[in-house]
Amino acid sequence: MDNLKNIFVIDDDKSIRWVLEKALTKKGFNVFCYKTSEDMINALEEVVPNVIISDVRMPGLSGIDLLDKIKREYPSIPIIIMTAFSDMETTVDSLKKGAYDFVTKPFDINEVTALIDKAHKNSFNNNFSEKIEPSKNVSKIIGTSESMQTIYKSIGKIAQTDIEVLILGETGTGKELIAKAIHDNSARKDKPFIAINTGAIPTELLESELFGHEKGSFTGAYNQRIGRFEQASDGTLFLDEIGDMPLDVQTRLLRVLQEGEFFRVGGSKSIKVKTRIITATHKNLKSLVNKEIFREDLLHRINAVKIELPNLKNRKSDIINLAEHFMRYYSQEYKSSLKVLNDDVKKVFLKYDWPGNIRELQNVCKYLSVMSVNSDVVVADLPRELVNEGIDSNININWEEVFESWILSEFNKDSKDISKNIDSIYESILIKSALTLSEGNKTEAARILGWGRNTISNKMKSIEK
């Protein structure tokens, strides 16, 4: 038996253990399978593995706790964590504690065996960084899609360094949340995290906002001001929409990144800082460089590591989880009963493209939490633009539910003469629909409705009034 090819598999699911054992044995590994973490720990007295692959949720000691324990005693053993219940906190926590990689079930067995083989080959020269304790206040990021799993892994690795990060993504994709998650899981987590939208501040004020100013340095500078760089010293400064930053401010930013020091506006004393910079933009910075409105050397400086956030329409599997999270959040925020999305509403949500991304979804959920009359949210409760674009011919809309919802909504608005208003709206819809079907022919429209021609003409005059 080759003592340098020992693989430990820990999972309480017998089928997972069986599949991995068969596949790895074919690759020439010595495979040892265990149902619990405690069983594996006992086995360490006899055999030391070269690679460990462990589930997260198991009876007794969890996979994360096992990872923590093994890393203290055997820091050079690569440990791969696998789970069917993937979220950002679990992924980041495992990577921070020294996991070699993170695998989401169900997995491709060929990809997993290749990953184990790679971990085995690297197991003799890996140097693991010092363990960082997990943050107790992890930013709330929802999503289990493949694209989000990649981002979670990036956060786990990036958080252990002070490397510059550039976050790319359209408006509303959650760039600040990602920046905050990196900060919250870093050694700087107890220091300030300050976010500033450089595109939202007038050019003449941006320099003072970032670097501060001395009293009397310009008209209106009645007092000394400490800038955001100083406020975030030893912490993290998040510069959103960096693509909108003026060239002269870009030059000053580049100097701070290169030298770790700057002067306040109107000041003569050099200020040294140890601020970590994370930047973000929805623009193509290379295109801005070509147009000579963004410094190429600054782009290279801030682009050491790049995280690209997907649009919400490209992570469909996360939409309902996000929506339900927001509905729960706003029911607590507004101290109202929890509103539940019915199946037809979920179909609309999944079909809609969400051009405003997560921010738009959040605003829709806020609207529904306040405006929906019943505990069940129906299609009639949705904003009109969402229904027009997100409606699907396969959705069976119960017009009686829609009608009932409308009546209750009118009643809650203290509307008077609801019956009279209904009659007017009802007849107007009938006539418009019949004229559409008859291509404007009143006689044919009257026939469709079972009315006389004079009747439809009189009703049309009444509606026009």
Image (spheres, rainbow, N blue to C red):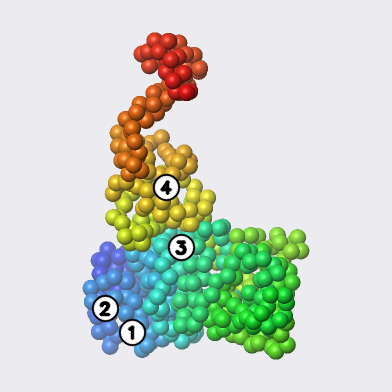
- Check disc 2 and give the amino acid type: Leu
Q: Nearer the viewer, mark 2 or mark 4?
A: 4
* Residue appearing at x 30%, y 33% in the figure: 400
In terms of sequence position, does the residue under pointer 3 or pointer 2 come before the other?
2
| CA gap, disc 1 and disc 4 | 42 Å
> Which label belongs to residue 350?
4
Sequence-first tag of 3 and 1: 1
Q: Residues within 10 Å of mark 4 (few under 14, many from 20)?
A: many
First in residue order: circle 3 vs circle 4: 3
Q: Is residue 411 above or below residue 49?
A: above
Residue that numbered label 2 is attached to: 61
Between disc 1 and disc 4, whose residue precedes? 1
Which quadrant of the rendered structure holds the N terminus? bottom left
Foreground label between 3 and 2: 3
Mark 3 residue type: Met
Callout in the foreground (3, 4): 4
Residue contact at pointers 2 and 1, CB within 8 angstroms: yes
**Quarter of the image where one finds residue 257:** bottom right
Distance between mark 2 and mark 1 Cα atoms: 10 Å
Report the Cα–Cα distance between label 2 and label 4.
Answer: 38 Å
How far apart are labels 3 and 4 at the CA level? 18 Å
Callout in the foreground (1, 4)? 4
**Residue named by callout 3:** 148
